[in-house]
Image (cartoon, coloured by chain):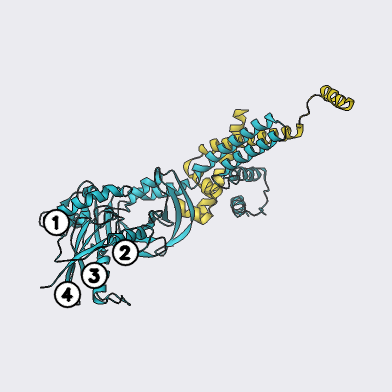
Amino acid sequence: MNIIRDRWRKKKTRGTSIDIDSIAQTKVLSDDITDIANRHLLIRRSLEKLNEDQRKVIELRIIEGYSVSETAGLMGIKAGNVRVLQYRALKNLVIIMNEEENHHE
Amino acid sequence: MNNVKKLSDFIDSLNDEKKPTVKADSEELNRMFDAVRQIKSLKSPAMPDEDFPHRIIQNLTEKNRHTAKSGKRTWAGGFAGIAAVLAVALLANFAGPIKNSYVVYAVEQAYNDVKAYHGTLEVVFSNEAGETQTQSVLDVWADKSGNYYIEVLEGSYKGLKTVSDGKNVWQSPTDENAMNVLPVFSETNEFIFELGNEVDELQNAESARIIGDDDIAGRPAYVMEVTPKGGLPYKLWVDKGTKIPLQKQSSMYKAIQYTTRYTVINFAESIPEELLTVGPDTGFKEVDPDGYKNTVKNPDKPEDITADIAENNKADSDTAKYTPEITVDVDMDIEKAEQIAADSGSSPWKLDPVYVAQVFISLQISPEGIVGEYPIHYNEFVIAESNGTSAKIEVISEKTHIKAVYLEKLIRQDDTGIWTVTGYDISP
């Protein structure tokens, strides 16, 4: 009986135990996913600011994963033009993303 | 290697899921590589399939239930989990519509440049057993104003020409009953693989995604799975070169699947004027495009159809068109069983009255069974009369004394109903 009482006293003193690690991990995961979602929103917003051909080449080449020749076929342009177009598109995108980030900070 | 090439190689490596070997030698290129990685993350590697969010919810529910049983309550974890699910669902919504959107766009753009086209359209049906049969081959001319010209090159209505100006439909040789026969496909008025309609349907689809590559009539094509708003999904083959749809395959429905394909297609400025001429001396007669619909019954309510059979048959007998000299006894139990078998994909030829007549005549000539070629060729049968539920097929052959075969759809009167021989005429 004394042992039980001692345990009860200890518990009362210490309070209810909580698995802090599990809460912390889940919260971090949640924050990460929120960050990813925000990041994706930023990329989307930035993509929308590119001109149509630049947006198209990025979607075909990077998001959908088509080869240069397939993208050229889909867009009706030469393979060399695809490479140049995607270079210019990404160059612009980096600038726009930086502007977007600065604007929202 | 210049930066343009480096960037392209970097993208290729990521597309091939390989570690990029190319190095960025400037801060600018490094940022572009980083941007490529971030854009790549828009694609949905975390979404193996559409059921993924549901599985997460289920797993979290089970996990929470387990946690509750063990006496631990991690409310913060629960809310974070829900937030995680919502975030993943959000990502899924972003990742979904963008996929393959530019193939749809490319099809739309390609069709915008089309003024008129001329092609050979093949209509094939197959059953669950994998048996296929070419139902018809059509010569098709169409333009964007709704005009079209269709001539049946092969099939039950060989020679039948259909012309439309987008509103009215004319046919030649004039056959008032042809409209009511086999209404599923374009031996009648219905133009089933009109490119404008296909592009519209693709644009308005619930989803459209590339599921593979194939070859249609020697042309490389993307295979797309299209789910229309309110309908069964179908497959569409899009020419990789022209971005024009070449083939469409329906879902298997009632054990039957239809495939329509342009084996040849060319683009033109307009339809030759002479093909659209339907003046009084041309043999064309205006027909009612919706006429056949009145004869189609609801296949889900066979009792309604059965109740109408007697009335229909009476009406037919009044015209005496479908009264044979010699009546063939029909066992309705066998016919019902045959209909069920056809519904499950067996004997698709029973849906074609000409084939049924051909088999009937062949068995009259060779009662022991048909070995090798049919004694009378398919082309030696001609549909003399038909209203969609009754038909009279004339036999043009000296190999048999039977000159006409009478058939009826006894069990079901829609396009899935089998034909049964009910009688025949013999030569005098």
Q: Do dots 4 and 1 share one subunit?
A: yes
**At numbered mark 4, what does the secondary structure look like: helix, strand or loop?**
loop
Residue B349 badge = 2
Residue B123 position, x and y percent, is: 33, 60
Quadrant where the N terminus of chain B is found in the figure: bottom right
Query: Marks 2 and 3, Cα distance to the nearest angstrom?
Result: 15 Å
Query: Is residue B126 visible from the viewing direction of this image?
Result: yes
Which of discs 1 and 3 lies nearer the camera? The answer is 1
Query: Marks 4 and 1, Cα distance to the nearest angstrom?
Result: 24 Å
Residue type, mark 1 in image: Ser
> Residue B130: which quarter of the image?
bottom left
Q: Do dots 2 and 4 share one subunit?
A: yes
> Residue B162: which quarter of the image?
bottom left
Position of residue B206 in the picture relative to residue B161 (left or right): right
Q: Of label 2 and label 4, which has the lower sequence position?
A: 2
Residue B151 badge = none
**At numbered mark 3, what does the secondary structure look like: helix, strand or loop?**
helix
Q: Of label 2 and label 3, which has the lower sequence position?
A: 2
Which of discs 2 and 3 lies nearer the camera? The answer is 2
Q: Nearer the viewer, residue B98 or B362?
A: B362
**At numbered mark 2, what does the secondary structure look like: helix, strand or loop?**
helix
Q: Do callouts 4 and 3 mark residues in contact (Cβ within 8 Å)?
A: no
Residue B317 badge = 1
